[in-house]
Amino acid sequence: MDGESLHQGNGNNVSAPQHTSGGRSRSRGPDFFLITCRGFGVITALAACFCIAMNVISAVQSFRNGNDIFDGIFRCYAVIIAIIVVIAETEWEYFLRFSKVLQYWVGRGMLQIFVAVMTRAYPEHMRNHQELFLLQSIAAYLLLGCGVIYIIAGIFCLGMLKRSHKRNHMSRDQAIKDLEHLQRRREELEALLLEEQA
């Protein structure tokens, strides 16, 4: 009887943390601040990709017509820098480790504004291509807006707040995984004890 009551007590102790951990994981819910930051990062990356496409088209036209080789080279540099903007928005740790400036939102915003200005530069070359000029302007102003928002958010230290939320989110997820692992381990040990008692 003592062994059975002891086992029942252990079983109750195990089931309670399971319910508690499940309740915590359900009640914690998603972090809407991180979701908003990811959504804005996707919009910024798409705007940068839009600028890449416009600069590629402009570079091809410049090299094909032979009117202004320097404009084509200028567009190639704009494409390279815009690719850096896209990579920065992926939050790739290996890349950000070697570019400390892009870890801060003010630095990202300044780079995005620079790409937007490069995309919008030399409008006189687009006089005969009004549709392309319109798309180029839309891409430039869209990325310019993202850059301004990044700079304002960086001034108010929202980037640091995002990193803090991300660290807390990762630590909570890791704690839940460790707790679930310990609970499974306890269940396995209790099953072994039951086999030995039987």
Image (cartoon, rainbow, N blue to C red):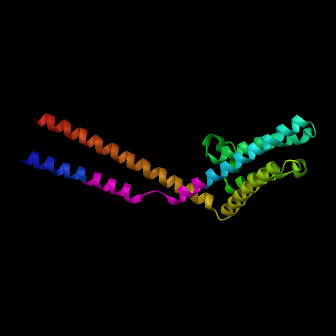
Q: Position of residue 62 (x, y in %)?
A: 87, 39
Q: Quadrant of the C terminus?
A: top left
Q: Position of residue 50 (x, y in %)?
A: 71, 47
127 horizontally vs 185: left or right: right
Q: Position of residue 145 (x, y in %)?
A: 72, 59
Q: Which residues are magenta?
A: 16-39
Residue sitting at x 91%, y 51%:
124
State the residue in front, 2 or 162: 162
Return the residue found at the far left. 1
Residue sitting at x 15%, y 49%:
8
Look at the magenta stretch and give its main secondary structure. helix
Above/below status of 125 relative to 105: above
Count of all numbered marks drawn on residues in the image: 0
Return the residue found at the far bottom. 156
> On the image, which quarter does residue 61 sit in?
top right
Residue sitting at x 89%, y 47%:
125
Magenta stretch containing residue 5, yes or no? no
State the residue in front, 49 or 61: 61
Above/below status of 64 relative to 139: above
Residue sitting at x 68%, y 45%:
86
Magenta stretch containing residue 36, yes or no? yes
11 horizontally vs 170: left or right: left
23 horizontally vs 65: left or right: left
Q: Position of residue 80 (x, y in %)?
A: 76, 41
Return the residue found at the far right. 67
